[in-house]
Amino acid sequence: MKYQPGDTVLLLHSNEEGEVVEIINDKMVLIDLEGVRFPVYLDQIDFPYFKRFSEKKLVIPKKEKVYIDQVKKEESVKKHKVSSGVWFSFLPLFDKDVFDDDVVEKFKMYLINQTGDALEFIYQINFKGAPDFKLTNTVFPFTDFYLHDIPFEEMNDSPKFEFDFSLINPNKKKAEHFETTFKIKAKQLFQKIEEMKLKNEPTFSFNLFENYPDKVEEMIPDYHHSYGQLYDISGIRQKLEPARSVVDLHIEKLTDNWQGLSNFEILTIQLSHFEKYYNLAIAHRQPNLVVIHGVGTGKLRNEIHEILKTKREVKSFANQYHTNFGFGATEIFFQY
């Protein structure tokens, strides 16, 4: 390998100098440029020494004396970073097969935050419906975050990528959470790899969202029969606060001022949040909802189960063992 981690290199397309921080493969390295890291091909960089020694020294002419009242005030130029949303990025790492052809060995997965918001996120990948990898962390404005590697062959196991975002600095006008999922079929994956090769780009990415969603006033519609009428919620649904597929009802997750509350007050807060996200799940026509109630004495679980027995939208519910929550969660399945 021509380059080693720590080498200073010249980016040929921008004439800027960066540092090699990682050797990705025999064709690519990871570069750090003023705190921003990104992959580049070897033919896009070179050592900067020739440039440094070949540049001619500028001859600076003698300046004429200029008096203070002759100096023009310079206009300040503000530099703005362009916000394009949050992206889920695939960096394929290639190897040679027995026929000396380039084949993808694995993918390096990145979360790219091209917004001005610092975000907390929960990332999870499921294969064939079973959870495989989970990560909770923070991605700061206009930075990239490395998630993990995925072997190429595992992309045939129906991967489902789940994200749950929230703002590090809460904003009353913004939603408390924003959940989104991403799936890609094998055919689409091959198409993206071929497009990437044709464009001579190192990665391909998918936009998860452009702007973190605003908070919508709670408008949970009653779409059941009322005075012989059924309310049409088709237009209202898109104005609602985003729903959640998993709701954690542990009291410390719901309020910072829970210490000193009575058991009745705690239960009231927990049931109120349950009703809120239950109704949101119905309004958004979710197929299912997982409610984390914990084990404890079983009081909260029993209360929720009694409520679910009265709901006509509930097809079934089960308090079975879950790989993430043990017996401390109930999964609800809806019918519409």
Image: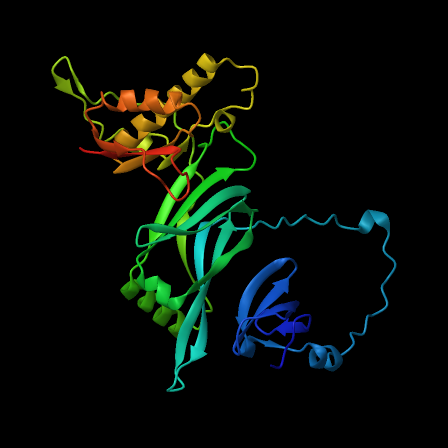
Quadrant of residue 321 within the rendered picture = top left
Say if residue 10 shows up in the picture.
yes
Determine the image quadrant of residue 283.
top left
Most distant residue in the front direction: 297
Which residue is drawn at the image coordinates 60% and 81% (left, top)? 1
Q: Is residue 138 left or right of residue 286?
A: right
* Applied colour scheme: rainbow
Determine the residue positioned at 31% across, 27% down.
Answer: 278
Name the residue furthest left. Answer: 228
Q: How many marks?
A: 0
Residue 117 seen in the figure: no
Task: Note whether 231 is above or below 68 in the view shown.
Answer: above
| Rendered location of residue 163, percent (x, y) | 42, 45
* Nearer to us in this view, 284 or 76: 284
The one of 94 and 194 positioned closer to us in this rendering: 94
Left or right: 70, with 176 as reference point: right
For residue 15, above or below residue 71: below
Reply above or below: 316 against 263: below
Percent across and percent down for residue 148 are 49, 58
Which residue is more in the foreground, 212 or 5? 5
Name the residue located 65 percent from the left edge and 71 percent from the top edge: 5
Residue 97: horizontal and vertical position, in percent?
39, 82
Q: Position of residue 69 (x, y in %)?
A: 83, 47
Query: Which residue appears at 75% of the width and 50% of the height?
Result: 72
Q: Is residue 111 shown above or below 151? A: above
Q: Looking at the rendering, which quadrant does residue 89 occupy? A: bottom left
Q: Quadrant of the C terminus?
A: top left
